[in-house]
Structure formats: C-alpha cells, structure tokens
Amino acid sequence: MENPGAKSTNPDAEKEEVMRGRVVEMRNLLDLVVHVSTCENAHSFNCVNRKCRKLMLLIHHVAKCETRSSGGCMLCKKLWFLLKCHAQVCKQSQSLCPVPHCRNIKEYLKVEDVSTSWRSEVMEHIIEEDNAAPVEVSTSAPDAHSSTNA
C-alpha cells in the first residue's frame, strides 16, 4: 500500500506537479494585474488586498524609475513581464481591457517570437486551459489570503 503523503519518485509526475503549481501561481498574478487595473482603492493604497497594494507600489516604482527595464532594473522587468503575460492570454477586445498597455503589447507580440523558456510553457498551459474553458471576467479582488506573492 502506498503512503498518500509520500512524494512520487516518477520524474514526469514531479515535473507535472511543478508545472501545475507554476500555472496556478501565474494565473493568480494575472488575476491580480486585472484587479489592480480596476481597483478603485489601488491608487490610494487603501485596498484591503495586501497584494494589490504591493503591485501598486511596483507600478509607482516603474513610473519613476530612471534605470528602466532596458537599463537592467529587475523591478521594472518584473512588471513588464506580468503585463506581457497578461496580453498573451487576454481575450477582451483591445478597447475594453482595463490593463495598461495591453493593446500595445498584443501588437508587439504579433511580431515578436516567444521564447521557449519555462515561462512560455506556463503561458501555453494557461492559454490551453483558457481555450478549453468558458471566458470568465471577474472584477472582484483576488483572495487576500492566498500564498502567492506579487
């Protein structure tokens, strides 16, 4: 009899479990990007969601940063990565999406070749899931008690 709490020795099962965790984490971050874009309390940092406030701080940093992502600022690169990932899976019409720069990034992605890094694998899984599931647009705040950090 197998111990249900024991870790699998199957490397494929372990890889799939890691990928599933990354997909869940990325989906939570993408939901947070949409939330921050529509949150009425985000700009005043009064949102009850701690992650909303944290992402808003990142957005304020990017607006004021002199180094920028092109100069090597890792915080700026993090935000632009999140915006790019959002644009890859966004199904809203370009004029209706509340996320800043979504339309511009979608246009950019049409001409840019996506890398084959693990991040692209995660995005492929999200896109596959989204294509299989009905579109659900939520304007509510993500769970403030989830374990993912922005």
Image (spheres, grey):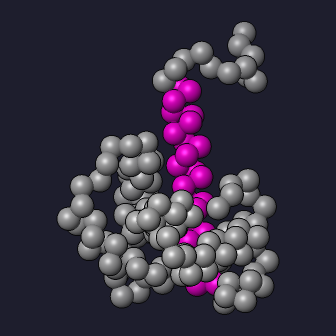
Front in this rendered view, residue 61 or 37: 61
Determine if the magenta segment contains residue 53.
Answer: no
Image position of 29 (left or right of 1): left
Up-down relation of residue 24 to residue 7 (above or below): below
Q: Which residue corresponds to the image point at 53% horizontal and 25% vertical from the top-left? A: 13
Going by the image, does 92 lie left or right of 141? left
Specify the segment rendered in magenta.
13-39
Q: Magenta stretch: dominant SS?
A: helix
Q: Residue at x 56, y 81 (%)?
A: 64
Quarter of the image for the N terminus: give it: top right
| Residue 80 x, y percent position in the rendering | 46, 67
Q: Residue at x 54, y 17 (%)?
A: 10
Q: Quadrant of the C terminus?
A: bottom right
Residue 144: name its quadrant. Answer: bottom right
In the image, is 123 to the left or to the right of 53?
left
Q: Nearer the viewer, residue 29 or 66?
A: 66
Q: Looking at this view, name the residue that lies furthest to the top.
A: 1
User: How many labels, in total?
Assistant: 0
Residue 36 in view here? no
The answer to whether residue 120 shows anywhere in this view is yes
Q: Quadrant of residue 3?
A: top right
Q: Residue furthest left?
A: 111
Does the magenta-highlighted stretch encompass residue 27?
yes
Q: Residue at x 24, y 61 (%)?
A: 112
Residue 101, percent from left and from top = 40, 79
Q: Position of residue 41 (x, y in %)?
A: 71, 87
Instruction: Judge whether 138 appears above or below 82 on screen.
Output: below
Give residue 28's position: percent from left, percent from top. Answer: 60, 60
- Horizontal arrangement in the rendering, residue 36 relative to residue 68 (left or right): right
